[in-house]
Image (cartoon, rainbow, N blue to C red):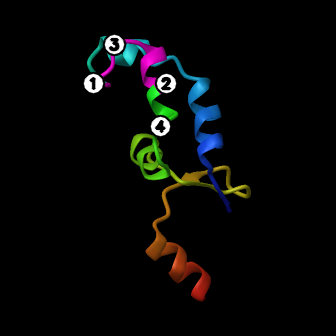
């Protein structure tokens, strides 16, 4: 399972145009797509996890999953 990096999330975000979500009030605190993407450059990984709802990519199933440190510890403990 691949854990997304900040670079991965920024590349992922670049494929989206957030302007409609901003205009419709689904994303607040930003006036333009460029503004949120510029702000994302300052985000930490937890900010991306909260925004996108996932942290890892499962290469086998193609699913994106949110895995917390506690869940990861259990998974590797066997």
Disc 3/disc 4 C-alpha distance (Å) = 17 Å
Near mark 3 (Cα within 10 A), the count class, few <14, some 14-19 or many ≥20, is: few
Disc 1/disc 4 C-alpha distance (Å) = 17 Å
Residue 22, by quadrant, is top left
Task: Name the secondary structure under disc 3.
Answer: loop
- First in sequence: mark 3 vs mark 2: 3
Which residues fall within the magenta stretch?
Answer: 27-38
Residue occupying image coordinates x 59% and y 34%: 10
- First in sequence: mark 1 vs mark 4: 1
Residue occupying image coordinates x 47% and y 44%: 48
Find residue 31 and name its label: 3
Find residue 54 and name its label: none
Near mark 4 (Cα within 10 A), the count class, few <14, some 14-19 or many ≥20, is: few
Q: Nearer the viewer, residue 22 or 32?
A: 32
Residue occupying image coordinates x 61% and y 24%: 15
Whether label 3 touches label 2, CB < 8 Å: no
Please indicate whether residue 41 sits to the left or right of residue 39 in the image. right
Task: Name the secondary structure under disc 4.
Answer: loop
Q: Tell me the residue that label 2 is attached to.
A: 38
Quarter of the image for the C terminus: give it: bottom right
State whether residue 71 is above or below residue 35.
below
Q: Tell me the residue that label 1 is attached to.
A: 28
Q: Nearer the viewer, mark 2 or mark 1?
A: 2
Near mark 1 (Cα within 10 A), the count class, few <14, some 14-19 or many ≥20, is: few
Find residue 42 and name its label: 4
């Amino acid at each position: 399972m691949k854990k997304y990096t900040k670079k991965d999330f920024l590349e992922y975000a670049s494929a989206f145009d957030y302007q409609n979500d901003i205009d419709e009030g689904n994303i607040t605190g930003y006036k333009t797509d460029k503004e949120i993407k510029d702000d994302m450059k300052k985000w930490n990984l937890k900010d991306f996890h909260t925004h996108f709802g996932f942290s890892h990519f499962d290469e086998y199933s193609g699913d994106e999953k949110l895995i917390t440190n506690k869940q990861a510890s259990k998974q590797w403990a066997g």
